Image (cartoon, rainbow, N blue to C red):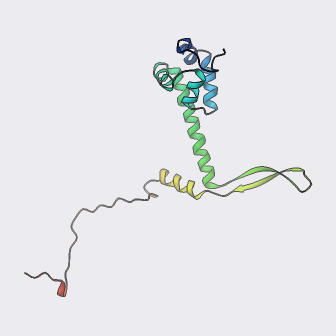
Amino acid sequence: MARGSGRRAKSDIDPEYWCEGEGLVEVQKWLAEKLTDIQIAKNIGVDRSTISRWKKRYETFNTIFKKEREVAIVELVNSAYKSANGYYYEEEALDAKGNKQTLKKWAQPSAATLMFLMKNWKRDEYRDRWEIDHSGALPVILKGEDQIPD
């Protein structure tokens, strides 16, 4: 059975192969495809907890996971920024004669994404809850009939 395809006995799995050897290339490919740790563990034939242990034990293995996560975060931020501003995209459609043509369309800016980005990037200016200092005493002025009798 080829490595990375299906379950094997745990004793058959060589951590050196996956964490420092040729298997590391396969793991990197899976990370680039945005597979989760659980999916990668399943591909290798180990538990998710084994992946965590290998990350602690093998620096190279841990580093590729961190780098791929950083790339994914940058891609998500760029995607959210694009969504907040709106963007053009191309879509293929058939005309009345059945010919394929490419249409350029505009995706409207997303107000929800814009609000999310502003609330997270500029917290002091765009937050829902404001903290107000209530220290100090407020004077109470009573007039006319409202006065308290002695």
The vertical placement of 117 against 64, above or below, is below
Q: Nearer the viewer, residue 135 or 111?
A: 111
Q: Position of residue 34 (x, y in %)?
A: 61, 34
Image point (78%, 50%), residue name: 91
Q: Position of residue 27 (x, y in %)?
A: 60, 24
The quadrant the C terminus occupies is bottom left
Residue, far bottom:
144
Q: Position of residue 68 (x, y in %)?
A: 57, 31
Q: Quadrant of residue 64?
A: top right
Residue, far right:
97
The vertical placement of 137 against 86, above or below, is below
Q: Nearer the viewer, residue 36 or 85?
A: 36
Image point (58%, 25%), residue name: 42
Q: Nearer the viewer, residue 50 or 106?
A: 50
* Left or right of residue 50, residue 87 in this image: right
Q: Total marks drawn?
A: 0
The quadrant the N terminus occupies is top right
Q: Position of residue 135 (x, y in %)?
A: 24, 62
Image point (29%, 61%), residue name: 133
* Left or right of residue 34, residue 97 in this image: right
Q: Quadrant of residue 148?
A: bottom left
